[in-house]
Amino acid sequence: MKITTLILSGILSLFLSGCGKMLYRAAEKEYHKGMKQQPYDAIIVPGFPYDGKKWDMVLQLRIHWAHYLYSKGYTKNIIFSGSAVATKYIESRVMANYAEALGVPREHLFTEEKAQHSTENIYYSYRLAKDQGFTKIALSTDPIQSSYMKRFIKRFELPIGLLPTVIDTVKTLNLYEPKIDVTNAIAENFQKLSDRENFFQRFQGTMGKYIEWHEEDLKTKKLRRKFKDRMISSSPENQEP
């Protein structure tokens, strides 16, 4: 969600055409490492804008990869993340609709609808997973996003594995676009993120500036001090009834 559709699609096109061999090898290595821990209770799949007409190549890649991991039994559930950011469509709902149309039962699909930046996709989905009682969790997205989200996961020591897309496997899949009804994904009173935040603010969001942290997830005193103004206390007296 953090980079524009045009830019990320262009980068991914270059990657798929063979210009990202190092990134490809790194993603495949991470995938095989992550596979040692499967099956996962849930995978997290970050959102991507949908224009209401046809899915973008990035959407195609992320949704079919999530479906592949589910169909193989590598994950029991899928969490799609993302609110309406660049268009009026709530990204996580659109993706869940596509996944259901591909054959994933609705009871195994979850949507996180608060995130507006990629780091928020990861963290808020992680919290949703915890609330559902899921303990084994992995991030499953395209190699580009996976490469820099790995640094975020590592920095905050989040117990999230990685199952990035393996392009050679994707090439064997039938990447068709099923028909879906998106009326349930239209956000009310929509306003584009780019109209609410300038470039610098959006960049800060991508870096995690606006995340509302749970105290228990900040492992060091330094981090708790740094994010004290955006930290939800884990103390019982501060919990909702």
Image: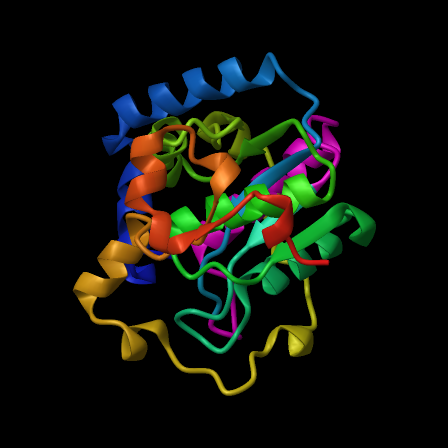
Q: Position of residue 40 (x, y in %)?
A: 67, 27
Closest to the observer: 173 or 30? Answer: 30
Quadrant in which the N terminus is drawn: bottom left
Q: Where is residue 108 in the image (x, y as percent from the top left)?
A: 77, 46
Lateral position of residue 105 relative to residue 111, left or right:
right
Lateral position of residue 138 relative to residue 135, left or right:
left
Lateral position of residue 132 relative to residue 210, left or right:
right
Which residue extends farthest left? 200
Closest to the observer: 136 or 229? Answer: 229
Question: Does the magenta segment cover residue 55?
Answer: yes
Closest to the observer: 37 or 144? Answer: 37
**Which residue sits at x=59%, y=78%?**
186
**Which residue sits at x=72%, y=40%?**
77
Q: Is residue 87 visible?
A: yes
**Which residue sits at x=48%, y=30%?**
158
Q: Quadrant of residue 64?
A: top right
First to last magenta residue range: 51-77
Question: Does the magenta segment cover residue 57?
Answer: yes
